[in-house]
Image (spheres, rainbow, N blue to C red):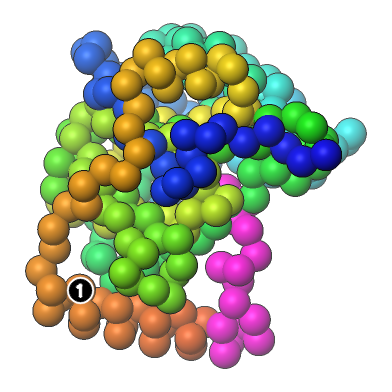
Amino acid sequence: MAHYRMPMLDETGYVVLDSFGGTMDPAEWLDLEYVDWKSSGDTRFAPLASAQGNIECNGFWHVDPPKADKDGVWIASQVDKAPTLAWRAQQPGANVGRCRVIELQPNSYADALYNSHLDDNNRLNPDGEGWVVRSFMQLTDNPDSLMVLREDINDPSTETRLRLPAGAQLVVDSERMWHSVWHVGTEPRYCLINSFESGPALEKWLDATHAVTGAESAPIDGAMATDAEVEAQRRRAARTEHYGYDPSSVRSEA
Ligand SMILES: [Fe+2]
């Protein structure tokens, strides 16, 4: 038996939802407790739900007993500071694994390609249950920043770039799609990331939010992209040489 996967994600591995229309108080993400956790660049994370309700970001399979990235335990001290964020993660009614805010410092397109990776979403997820995917709920208004998705990290023609204004919402099969963010600007970017189990509840939420597949890719300068591709692949190759294997081929715990 295989995991249940949502047909909506079959075609492109991601969907774009309606923007979140409500207003958000930046205190909900600025006042949280963050832990240093490097993933996809210069980042910190503030967990709202973790494997056991502690303020840490380890994979759920590291706890005793190990568990799949589902049934996240809410962290009261964080939820108290961010009730709307916790509500947004729970509102679809799907099983929530990790729920956390990412803080990402500005970077370059080449950095984003260098940092691109696959997530480890389904370790210990029992056969027959729903495939775990990720939702990205953009908090800060960064319309010039881009979520960079690739089906094949070595093939730029498989890339889709999605703009990240405040309220942007995506659901991505991030164990299939290489992903990272090119964040333009001078201030950090904040985004709520949730692990959701595929199933009827999540599908109902995607329908209600008019999720669409195959969104239009944001344009970028061709010469810049060519140079960045060369730089990123050179840095990726050097990293592989250094470690003796490609660490981005080992799915990220973050
Ligand atoms: Fe990731």
182 versus 96 height, above or below? below
Q: Which residue is mark 1?
A: 225
In the image, residue 128 lies at what x, y percent?
79, 32
The answer to if 246 sits in the magenta stretch is yes
Would residue 193 be visible to someone looking at this image?
Answer: no
In the image, residue 173 lies at what x, y percent?
52, 44
Q: Farthest residue in the right direction? A: 65
233 versus 184 height, above or below? below
Tag 1, which secondary structure? helix
Figure quadrant of the N terminus? top right
Would residue 251 be visible to someone looking at this image?
Answer: yes
In the image, residue 205 lies at what x, y percent?
45, 16
What residue sits 25% from the left and 66% below the top? 109
What residue sits 60% from the left and 56% below the top? 252
In the image, residue 108 lies at what x, y percent?
24, 65
Nearer to the camera, 234 or 154 = 154
Seen in the image, is 211 located left or right of residue 145?
Answer: right
What residue sits 73% from the left and 37% below the top? 3
Seen in the image, is 119 located left or right of residue 45?
Answer: right
42 versus 46 height, above or below? below
In the image, which residues are magenta?
A: 240-254
Nearer to the camera, 221 or 62 = 221
Displayed quadrant of residue 51: top right
Indicate the amino acid at tag 1: Ala
166 versus 93 height, above or below? below
The answer to if 80 sits in the magenta stretch is no
What residue sits 51% from the left and 30% below the top? 194
Nearer to the camera, 54 or 157 = 157
